[in-house]
Structures are given as C-alpha cells and as structure tokens.
Amino acid sequence: MMAMEQMKRQPVVLIVDDDPTAQQTTEMLLLQQGYALHFAASGPEALSRVAPINPDVILLDVMMPGMDGFAVCRELKTAVATQHIPVVLVTALDSKADLARGLEAGADDFIHKPVNGLELRARVRSMLRIKQRHDDLQTTMQLRQDLANMIIHDIRSPLTTITMYCDLLQQTTTPEGQEALQTITGQVNRLNSYLTDMLMMAKMENGSLVLLRT
C-alpha cells in the first residue's frame, strides 16, 4: 500500500534561490516535467519548508546572503530526518576548492550557472531515481519489521500457553513426568530467547533499538 502511494505521488522539488529571476528560470525549465515545484528565498526558509512539503529533490543555490548553500546542505545532511533527500548545488563557482566544500557538506550533485535545461532535467531525474530507491528500501525494511513483529507475537502466544500448562501439570504428574515437563519448559524458554534475539536484531536493523542506562 505504501509503495503504491509513493508511485502515485507527484515528485516534489524544492528550489532554493534568493534571486527571483533564477527561481523563475528554473521553474520554466521544469514546468512541463510533472513535478510539484516549491520555492524558498533563503537558507532558513528552506530548512523550515522541508518538513511540511517533504521534497524528493532540493535544488540549492550556493551564493545566498546570510546562510549560504553549503551551510544549508550541511544542516540537511547531518539531520536524520532529511539526510536521505538528494541535494543538488546550483552554483557559479567552479574551482576545485568550492567543489570540495560542496562534497564535504554532503551535496549529491552539482549544476553550474547559467543552468542548461537539458542538464537540469537529467540531473533531477537521476536524483529522483535515487530517492525512489531509498523510499523502496525503507518500505521493504518496514514490511520486514512488521512481519518479524507479527511472527514473534504469533509464536510467543502459544509458547506462553505451553509454559502455563507445564506449570499446572508439574503439580499432578509423576517424577518422570515432571522431568519431561522441565525439558519442555527449557525448550520453550530457549525458543523465547531466540525470539528476543530476532526482535532485537530487527530493531537494530531498523534503527529503533533504544538502550536504557541503569
């Protein structure tokens, strides 16, 4: 269900540039591509808009007053909630030092100004494919987590019942029977231990395991 919703969802592109003319140019170049285009005129505005619109790609101008594109990119890539969003730096800078700064900030790709329409559309499509693969992987991992939880729950319920009846029979059976019941109880506890390990592994892979200090 979640995968189908992602396939039907219109790709969202956030365009971040303090120059209205540059925003309009990028909008015209992408207008016929079927994307939902959103705009921000500064770094702080871009960061505030990410959560509400959940962009699939961010086109981020580098040379902005105050908080530049490098700083914005760094913020996005260090936050767990946004580090998976592809960021394309749009810049007139072309020195190796500037490109290195962009890579260090976590940029996924670069486009040089003046922007070429064919190049822009190709790079956005490429980034959308990367984002789609990430989303598909997250969906698969969530399904795996849900399946593991369901299996563990469904197995633990009958194991609990077995343990309860073993405890009841311990009071009425012969010494030989009690020994057999102890063996059964030991195997049930062993299975419960395996299930606990499976659940912990699933949570670790999903990043939801929380360690509590004692």
Image (cartoon, helix red, strand yellow):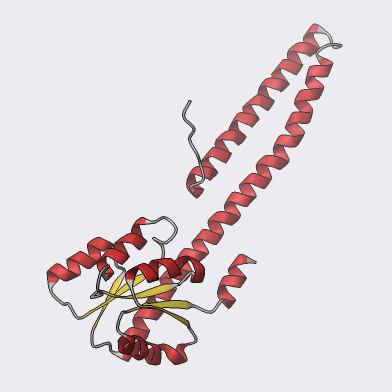
* In the image: residue 99, left or right of residue 24: left
Q: Residue furthest right?
A: 172
Give the number of callouts: 0
Residue lying at the far top of the rendered structure: 175
Q: Position of residue 49 (x, y in %)?
A: 44, 70
In front: 37, or 187?
Answer: 37
As displayed, is residue 199 above or below residue 98?
Answer: above
The answer to whether residue 62 is above or below residue 101 is: below
Q: Which residue shows up at 51% across the image and 59% down it?
A: 138
Say which residue appears at 83% left-offset and 11% top-offset.
Answer: 171
Q: Position of residue 104 (x, y in %)?
A: 23, 61
> Is 139 above or below relative to 178?
below
> Which quadrant of the structure image shows residue 180?
top right
The quarter of the picture where the N terminus appears is bottom right
Q: Is residue 30 left or right of residue 62?
A: right
Percent across and percent down for residue 12 are 47, 77
Give the residue drawn at x 53%, y 44%. Answer: 203
Q: Position of residue 173 (x, y in %)?
A: 85, 11
In this view, the residue farthest toward the front is 66
Q: Is residue 64 above or below residue 165?
A: below
Which residue is nearer to you in this view: 164 or 103? 103
The part of the image, by quadrant, that contains residue 183 is top right
Quick check: 24 left or right of 151? Answer: left
